Structure formats: structure tokens, C-alpha cells
Amino acid sequence: MSNKRVLKLREAMQNKSVKALFVTSSINRRYLTGFTGSSGYVLITMDAAYLLTDFRYMTQAPQQAQGFTVVEHGQRVTDTIKELLSSSNITELAFEQEDVSFSAYTTFAQQLKPVELLPVAGLVEQLRMFKDEEELKVMQRAADLADETFQHILGFVKKGMTEREVDLEMEFFMRRKGATSSSFDTIVASGERSSMPHGVASERVIQGNELITFDFGALLDGYCSDLTRTIALGQPDPKLKEIYDIVLEAQLHTLEHIKPGMTGREADALARDIITKYGYGEHFGHSTGHGLGMEVHEMPRLSKLSDDVLKPGMVVTVEPGIYLPGLGGVRIEDDIVITDTGIAILTHSSKDFTVLPV
């Protein structure tokens, strides 16, 4: 049975004059093969596709890795790779330079002699940028679970709880609903800590009359969601309501105007220009968004330095924010799919300024 992802990868390899590719990234391994085990390597040539793993997975791997020849590698995987390359008269092997450490590289280079190692970047990642119909179905389920989790936590969070207690409840809720884990370390940032864009949950006790930012996602069947909402507990400083309205305007404007053919730089400017217009440009220090998929940060980037072109099938986040040190901050984030004509939004939690009673 042929594997469409392998066929596309071979096209990319051919364009780079790569005759054989050694895949060490666990994410790329799962993407190409569907194999969910914890150990294995992929070797792709123009004529063969191998999944190399150890004896623990010799029943599981053939069931999952459609279109692959599953090989139980020796004590040193390099010995098996060397044999396979030799049988095909291949003398050059490309490797994933962004995944292989220098120590691993020197070991591979020594053990694979006389095969020459060639560093390459992004061959599989470029394919992963474009989600097919089945991937989008999984990502919609992951987004739905994030929305459900946010709705649940609105009825749970109370003054006097620690941020970590709230984080733990969110984690348990997502796990009970089928998630493997959270997509990343959940951010629950309350009060002045909400001015920290990556303020992961701490032992801080949530007070009244302050903002709480929740930035989280579900890792479900190999794919991530990423949702941010900022709410009020009681009546916070009016300045915080002001920046909430500005961030919401910037986010909604971006969702309305982002489209295929735009560069990441142009998409970033949709949000950044509005925040700058209100005088808060220096308080928006991160990018407007990023690619999303099997990892929570993928290509493309929506930043003022990005020339990545948005194309149908890409899934990206839109997440402008304003952060005022010592007072608090606001971020609002949704996951979207770039379509032929515009976008489809995956996350649907309310963005109305939510005020919970103290």
C-alpha cells in the first residue's frame, strides 16, 4: 500500500537532490508512518520506505505503519542503516539537522563511514504545514475540547484558589475527555502575573478584582489545540478593561482580513497596527501567531519578520496581546484554518468581556 506522505516527501527530496533521508524526529516519524511507539527511525529512499524499531514494537509497528517495510534494527541502528544503504548502492545520507545533536552527528558520522552525512532542514516540516481532511477533523476535535475545558473552568475558578489548582483541574478535565495531555505547560496567570505572556501556573493565590489569562490546549490523537481567553474576577482596574477592548478589536480585525496569499508579516501587521494606533505597540512584544499541528509551534509564523506565505490547508493561531507590567495583561487567541477564500475558525469560546463574581 502506498503512503501519500512518503510520495510527497520523495518529491521534496528530489527537488533537493536527496537520495536518502534519515528521519530521527519522533514527531516526523509519527507523521510519516502513523507509528505511535516511543522508539524508532525512518529511512526513506527513492525506492523504499523503512521504519526501523526494536523488538518491543515488532507487532505494533507493522499494524500502524502503512506503506512501510518494518525492520527490527540491530543493537546499533546505524549498522542496519548502513546495510540498507549498501544494498541500494547509496553513499550519501541526508539527516534532520534541527533534530540531531552535535554529539549524535559525530557518532552517526563515525559509525556510518564511508557514507557521507548531509544536513537538511524542513523537508518533512514543509509537508506538515498543510493539513489534510483527516488531520483537520482531529484538530477540530482538539479545538472543541479546549472550548469545553474553558467553559468548565469558568464554573470552577474561585478567589482563594492557587493558579496551580486551576491548572490541575484543566489538565484532569482534558484527560478525562480523551486528551493524551495538555499541548504545553498551561498558563494560568492572574493579577499582575497576567502581564507575563508565558506566566505558567504558579502557587499565587487568585485574588478578587483582577484579570486571569488562560492559555492552554489539548493534545488529542497526536494534534494540538491552542486557546487563550482573558477574564475578570470581580471589577479590575478600568485600564485593564480598556486594553481588553483594544486587544479584542485587533484580534477580530485580523480574523476578518487575514487571507491566503498574505505573508506572515502582513498578517502580523493587521493586529499590530491597531494596538500601535492606541499607543500600546511597545507592550505587544510577541508575534501575532504561529503554525499549529502535531506540535504547538510549527511553521508558518505570523510575525513582523516573517515572509512565510499563507496558503490553504495551513492552521495558525491569531493571538495579539497587551501587557502592562505591575498591573496585568490581556491576550485573546483562536485557531484558524486558511482556506481557498479566507479562513475557518476552529475555536469558538466567547470573547465577550467575562466578569465572574468574587
Image (tube, rainbow, N blue to C red):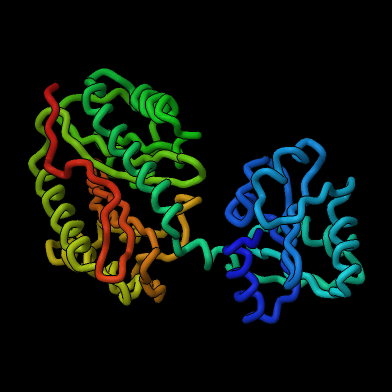
Q: Quadrant of residue 200?
A: top left
**Residue 22 shows in this picture:** yes
The answer to whether 238 appears left or right of 298 in the picture is left
The answer to whether 301 appears left or right of 57 in the picture is left
Please tell me which residue lies in front, 358 or 350.
350
Q: Give the residue at x 38% y 59%.
A: 315
The answer to whether 55 appears left or right of 11 in the picture is right
State which quarter of the image contains the C terminus: top left
Residue with the most extreme front position: 1
**Residue 202 shows in this picture:** no
Residue with the most extreme top position: 160
Figure check: 197 above or below 203: below
Position of residue 82 measured from the top left corner of the image (x, y, whole percent): 88, 63
Position of residue 185 measured from the top left corner of the image (x, y, whole percent): 45, 38
The answer to whether 173 appears left or right of 257 in the picture is right
Q: Give the residue at x 66% y 71%.
A: 120
